[in-house]
Amino acid sequence: MPPLRAGAAQLDITPGLGAHLIGYFTDRLATDILDPLNAKAIVLSDGDMTLGFVICDLIVVPGEVVNAAKARIQEQTGVPPENVLIAGTHTHTGPAIIGALGTLPEEGYAEWVAPRIADAFTMAYRRLQPAQFAHAAGSVPGEVHNRRWHMKDGTVQMNPGHLNPDAIRPAGPTDPQLGLLVLRSPEGAPIAALGNLSLHYVGISGPKHDVVCADYFAAFGVALNRLAGAQFVCPLANGTFGDVNNLDFSRPPRTSTHARHQIERVANVVAAEAWRIWSGLREDDFRDEVPLGARLMQVNFPARTPSAEELCAARAQVAAGEAWNDAEWLYAREIVLCMEAPLEWLVPIHTLRIGDLGIVGLPGEVFTRIGLDIKARSPFPQTMNIGIANDTVGYVATDRALDEGSYETRLCRHVRAPKGTGKLWADTAVAGLESLK
């Protein structure tokens, strides 16, 4: 087997001031830029196969952008689309690459960013050099909390509030595992590191959210660079995070002294754990002969639709006049827009192999229990799940959660997954991993 080579690069994808920002119910226009957004690429090659990742500081990367970027990557490098995973981190202070709820899409941004995502990959490809690979797993249980809670009235509520006497217990699990992929030169110099954690996002503290910021994902890379005493590309890929955030509702809320307080705090905790497990690797954990593999499968997605009565009521509410600050009006508009969109299509389930590390790419904000099922059934000793990969259908809840209700299950353009989706995706992912093993 030829020796491994690897390369890494990142490219700025920051929008300008005045850009529509996505992540909240209402529209926001960027008034400041706290830190740059980047597309961070890592490429590996064993001579026979080349594969790689581009992790983007975006809330999602829609399928049309992924397809355009992959076509340019193949044209520039020859690497086929099935060997490239493109994902967003899920920052909630980035440009509106799509529209959702009260936020309008930022015109022209999707078309502008697709070639830059591709160019980041191509730059990493052209920087391929002899490399060694290792991976490790740690845990940060104090930083991940299920945000859906069983309430005394029998309902399930998202974000019930800190120390709410009516909140009984979390309605789902968490996955505190921190995955880490490390690439270094034969002399030991870091080339790149890829982290992976199932945590929705950790964003700006305080009332001012009309700023561009890469959330804690980018701060993780800065912190790990600082700990390693070197500069290298260091993306943090999100996992199966659909029902998990950073708020422990069983305790009082944390105090923030400035806008980036929680971003930097959580990034430091996660980076410290990454550096701990990296430093615990032995020399014989690093290999320069590593089998690579990739498989991209398509599965059917029959989107949920409203009943005739729900659609009629929504159309009437929308026709009555615009009310962009009214959540009920926004949901009515979403129902109308759902019926103007395709009702069924194919979505990609991606599996990759790097040595004895399995990687799964899922095109949505997948609930953690589904990701835990994939990891438990994976034939590889360690598996990373990467969410919102290669496209997104929005939330993918468990069947039980769909019965329980709350925000992640209410029909809109980013909540259309029907019952059975989680099982189908998990079964397909496991089959893909088994085919690579």
Image (cartoon, rainbow, N blue to C red):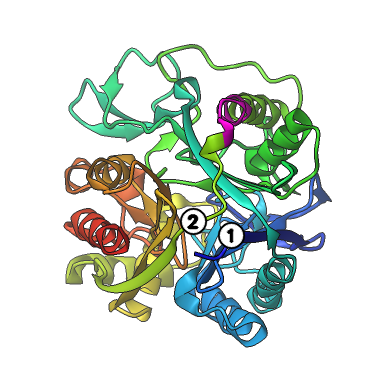
- Counting labels gives 2
Q: Residue at x 54, y 17 (%)?
A: 253
Q: Residues within 10 Å of mark 2 (few under 14, many from 20)?
A: many
Range covered by the magenta-colored residues? 273-283
125 sits left or right of 336 in the view:
right
Q: Residue at x 74, y 69 (%)?
A: 123
413 sits left or right of 257 in the view:
left
178 sits left or right of 350 in the view:
right
**Furthest-bottom residue in this view:** 75
Residue 58 spot, x, y in % from top left: 61, 57
Q: Which badge, 2 or 1, is on the more N-terminal residue? A: 1
Q: Vertical placement of 339 versus 385: above or below?
A: below
Residue 145 spot, x, y in % from top left: 41, 27
Q: Residues within 10 Å of mark 1 (few under 14, many from 20)?
A: many
Q: Secondary structure at mark 1?
A: loop
What residue sits right under mark 2 in the picture? Answer: 290
Q: Quadrant of residue 437?
A: bottom left
> Does the magenta stretch mainly form a helix, a strand or a loop?
helix
* Structural distance between the alpha carbons of marks 2 and 1: 6 Å
Q: Secondary structure at mark 2?
A: loop
Q: Is residue 40 visible?
A: yes
Q: Amino acid at mark 1?
A: Leu
What residue sits right under mark 1 in the picture? Answer: 4
Q: Amino acid at mark 2?
A: Val
Near-viewer residue (185 or 180): 185
Q: Is residue 180 visible?
A: no
Q: Are marks 2 and 1 in contact (CB under 8 Å)?
A: yes
Near-viewer residue (225 or 100): 225
Q: Residue at x 64, y 16 (%)?
A: 255
